[in-house]
Each structure stands twice: as C-alpha cells, then as structure tokens.
Image (cartoon, rainbow, N blue to C red):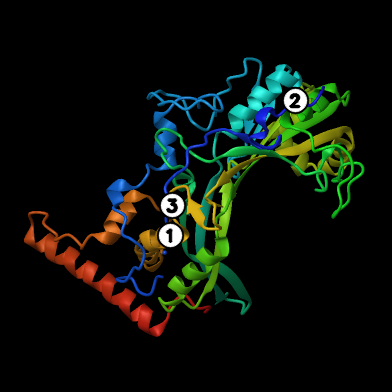
Amino acid sequence: MGKPSNPGGKAADDAVSLHTNPGESSMSNYNDLDEFDAPEISVDDLPPNYSETAENESLLPPPGELMPVPAASGSARASQPFVEDATVFNDDNTGAQFWVAKSLEYPEALEKHIRHLAAIPPRPFIKVIGTHTETTRDSKGKTEKNTVTDFDVSVELTPYLYSDARYLRSWTHIQTVDNGEKTRRGTRIRKRAPGSNQNIEVGNPKPTLKEWCHRYSASHAGLKAFALQRRMIGFDEELVKQRLRQLVKDTNYRGHLKVELVTKDALVECYNEARTNRWRLTSWIQFLFACTLLFIFTWPYLWLRTKRWEVVVAEWPYSRMAEGGTKEYVSISEDQWYNMWGRAICKAVLEKRQTTLDQSDLRRAEEAELALNTGNSTVDGALGLFRAGINAMNEVNRHLGWGGDC
C-alpha cells in the first residue's frame, strides 16, 4: 500500500487530470431586455443540451485518453452497470447513485470505477422560483393559507463545463481531501487526519486515490461505503443570483423569490457486498420502515455499523485562474451566460412557466412573434386577440405589480 511516486513533479499526488484541454478565455451588464454588453453568441453555436449528448454518446473514454465518441445507445451518465456483478440504485430526486458489488472491494477495481465515474459531470441547475400565499376562508369562517407557485424556471449549466461537449473536452480532475479537512476517513464521524489540526499539518502528505482505495479494501468493517463527490468550481454563484433577482424584480414581481443553485448527479457511493446494504437501498423497504417507524431503531444500527470514506472529489472547473492572475473560462463567462439567457428567463417568468429551459426557448425569446396563419381568418382573429390579451396583461403586471400575497 505504498505511495505511488510522482514522476517529474508535474502535478500534485491528489490532482489527477482526466481531460486537460483548455478552452478559450472569455470575459462581460444586463440593463434591460434589449441591451446586452457582452459579446453576442449565436444560438446555433451553443453546446448541445447535456441530455441530448447523453442520449447520443457511449460510455466515456478512459481518463487521460481523448477521442471522438461514436453514437450509441449508451448514456454518458453511466446509468447501465459496467461492473458485471454490480447492483445499482438511483435516487430520482437528486440523481445520486449507489453501487453494491463484491468486485468493488478490490482496490484496483475500485480505483478504475471511481476514475470512470469522475469523468461524468455533475448537473448544476440555476433555479428561479416565485411563490405567493393565498388566504382563503371556508363556510365556517376558518382561514387557511396555501402557498401557490407562480413560476419555477431552471437552466442547466452542464454544457458550459465543457470546452467541446461533443468530444468531452473539459478541465476536470480528481482531488483527495487535505489532511486538515474534517471528513469521514473510514470512520463514522468527520475528523481530521492524525497529526493535523485546522491550521497546521504535521506528518505525511495526504493520501492519493490509490492509497484510499487500498485502505478501504483492507478494512474489515461489516458495512462500508466509499463515496465520490462531483463538484462544479469557479462559478460566481452570487453574481448570477444577484442579477437574476434584479431581473425578476424589474418585472414588478411582489411575491416570494428564491434563486438557488441545485446540483444533481453529485454523489456516488460504492458499498461492499452485504445483504444489509441491499436492503437499506431498496425503495419499498425504505418506505415500509418509514411507515412503520422502524427506522427509529434501524438508523442508529446502520450508523454505528457503517464506516464511510468521503475522501474523493471530482472537480469540474467553470473557470480557473490563469498566469498573470486573470480568469479564464472553459466555455463562456457568467456575464455571457446571463446575457444569453436573460430574455428567455424573463419571458418564462412572465408566462408563469414551470419548466427547464432549453435552446428552443432561447430561439423563441430572440425571435419576433410569428404571424398567425391557420388558413381560417376567424380562428386567426381569435388567436390574435388571445395573444394580445396575454401581452396586455403582462404589461399591466409589469406596471402595477403581480404575485403578491392575497
């Protein structure tokens, strides 16, 4: 279980490059729907939606090897097991994956598996949600408050983590945790490495991925789990949130606004082969234990018996610092992203949509409304009146305010 050498000192032991293909640098204010300061980007030049890429490409190439991916029925999310004896459980809400396999208890197989999964990106979404509270009174005079969602608009950031999404070029790399960081290192509770505190590290360098896999394999714990976290870095979240809040505020929205960054497919956990691990991840067993309140007894048991390794992170840079202290982006800057999506988001908010926007929404926001021509003048006139009524209502809302509590 010795530490592998680092020939030539090219990179730190914990930083294993998967696809190092620098993209072009790009730099940016959004004042109104018709004024954008950043360079224009054609909709046709945008990277494909991640879902489209996932549907058309096979499993990712091995780390460090860059090659065109032929069209196939596989998914870039690796939803189909490529470990023969693996059983995979998926969380539909968060996109988390849980693998149970005897073969993954061997260090070489586990390391290869982690590297493969690290080459699959997280799926960050910018979500803009508006709600208001409606107070109603029943026949007995009792009041009831209900929360109504006015709009729930999301935009996925995954395509912008690639400099070339079709050939899977990115700046992603694997990092292991620092010795001074509190995390689970084959333990039940989070702790720092022995001999380290928050400010001072004493002792050996931090272990590499290969060493952590050997430590996991050597453990005799009855239940154990090795986790991989995928993380987008280098994205100015607060800047984008601030501009989106101002964008919605400019529509005179008076409800409760929430802008957040939600990341799916951010967690993968590999469990050792054990009947208990299969039971704990089975949906109907989880539902049964929740309904019967048996989880009150099983949760402490599982917590005490399970040792966890949460020591590996796959970092996906949105931007990074270049030589000379300037920032370079793997695809486009936050300003360019905002200026690209501002019209579409504003339009979706005013239309009170609850959806994830895609390239068709970008095109629709940039194009003028098409003339109605159904071949029937009566129908065209009715549809035209309906469209004019919606546009007039949106303008009234923007002047008088909309979405307040009532």
- Where's residue 281, x and y in %? 71, 32
Front residue of 215/87: it is: 215
* Label 2 or label 3, whichever comes before in sequence order: 2
Q: Is the residue marked by circle 3 packed among few (<14), some (14-19), or many (20+) residues within 10 Å?
A: some
Q: Is residue 11 visible?
A: yes
Q: Is the residue marked by circle 1 packed among few (<14), some (14-19), or many (20+) residues within 10 Å?
A: few
Left or right for 147, reference 295: left
- Where's residue 361, x and y in %? 33, 54
Element type at mark 2: loop
Q: Amino acid at mark 3?
A: Ser
- In the rendered view, would you say 263 is above or below 221? below
- In the rendered view, would you say 111 is above or below 138? above
Callout 2–callout 1 Cβ contact below 8 Å:
no
List the residue tagged with mark 1. Answer: 27
* Label 2 or label 1, whichever comes before in sequence order: 2
- Where's residue 248, x and y in %? 45, 72
Mark 2 to mark 1 CA distance (whole Å): 39 Å
List the residue tagged with mark 2. Answer: 4
Left or right for 173, reference 33: right
Q: Amino acid at mark 1?
A: Met
Q: Amino acid at mark 2?
A: Pro
Callout 3–callout 1 Cβ contact below 8 Å:
yes
Q: Quick one: quadrant of the N terminus? A: top right
Mark 2 to mark 3 CA distance (whole Å): 34 Å
Q: Is residue 91 visible?
A: no
Residue drawn 52% across and 33% down?
77
- In the rendered view, would you say 168 is above or below 405? above
Determine the image quadrant of residue 184.
top right
Element type at mark 1: loop
